[in-house]
Image: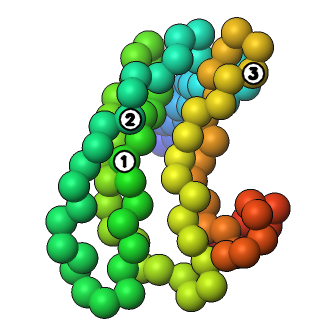
Amino acid sequence: MKLKNRLILATVVAGVAGGFAGSAFAGVGVSINLGVPVPPPAVVYEAPPPPPAVGYVWIPGYWGWHGERYVWIRGRYAYGRPGYAWRPDRWEQHGDRWHQVSGSWEREGHGGREHGHR
C-alpha cells in the first residue's frame, strides 16, 4: 500500500514540475525571440532622489514588456563600478519588431564595444 502511494505522489510531482518548466520556457521564447509589434511609449523622466551613499549611480527607468503591454520599470540606484558607465536599457527596431536591449556597465572610453556585468 505504501509503494502505491509513493508512485502516485511521484507521478503528481513530475506532472506539476513538467507544467512549470513548459510554461516558463514558452514565456521566455515569445518575449525574447519574436520581439514586440508596437514601439515603446516615450521615456518617462524621473528626477533621481538623493543617492543612498557615496559611490551610487542612478540607473534610469525603462519600458518593459509584460504580457501584451508595456509597463514602466522605475529607476533605481546601484553601486557604481570604477572605470565603467551605465548604458541604460533601451528598445531597438529590427524590421517590423521591437527588441529590448538590457542595460549594462560599459568600460568608459571604449565606445560601447566592451560590456561589463550588470
Q: Looking at the image, do the residues carrying marks 1 and 2 touch, with CB atoms under 8 Å apart?
A: yes
Q: Secondary structure beneath disc 3?
A: strand
Q: Secondary structure beneath disc 2?
A: loop
According to the picture, the residue beneath numbered tag 2 turns out to be: 43
Q: Residues within 10 Å of mark 1 (few under 14, many from 20)?
A: some
Rounded to the nearest angstrom, the CA distance separating label 2 from label 3 is 19 Å
The image quadrant of residue 114 is: bottom right
According to the picture, the residue beneath numbered tag 1 turns out to be: 61
Residue 28 in sight from this viewpoint: no
Q: Secondary structure beneath disc 1?
A: loop
Nearest the viewer among 9 and 14 is 14
Picture coordinates of residue 19, whole percent (x, y): 56, 25
Picture coordinates of residue 74, whole percent (x, y): 29, 47
Residue depicted at 22% across the width and 80% down the height: 52
Sequence-first disc among 1 and 3: 1
According to the picture, the residue beneath numbered tag 3 turns out to be: 94
The image quadrant of residue 104 is: bottom right
Q: Looking at the image, do the residues carrying marks 1 and 3 touch, with CB atoms under 8 Å apart?
A: no
**Which residue type carries mark 2?**
Val
Front label number (1 vs 2):
2
Residue depicted at 38% across the width and 35% down the height: 43
Sequence-first disc among 1 and 2: 2
Q: Residues within 10 Å of mark 2 (few under 14, many from 20)?
A: few
Residue depicted at 55% across the width and 40% down the height: 90
Q: Residues within 10 Å of mark 3 (few under 14, many from 20)?
A: few
Note whether 70 is above or below 13 in the view shown.
above
Rounded to the nearest angstrom, the CA distance separating label 1 from label 3 is 22 Å
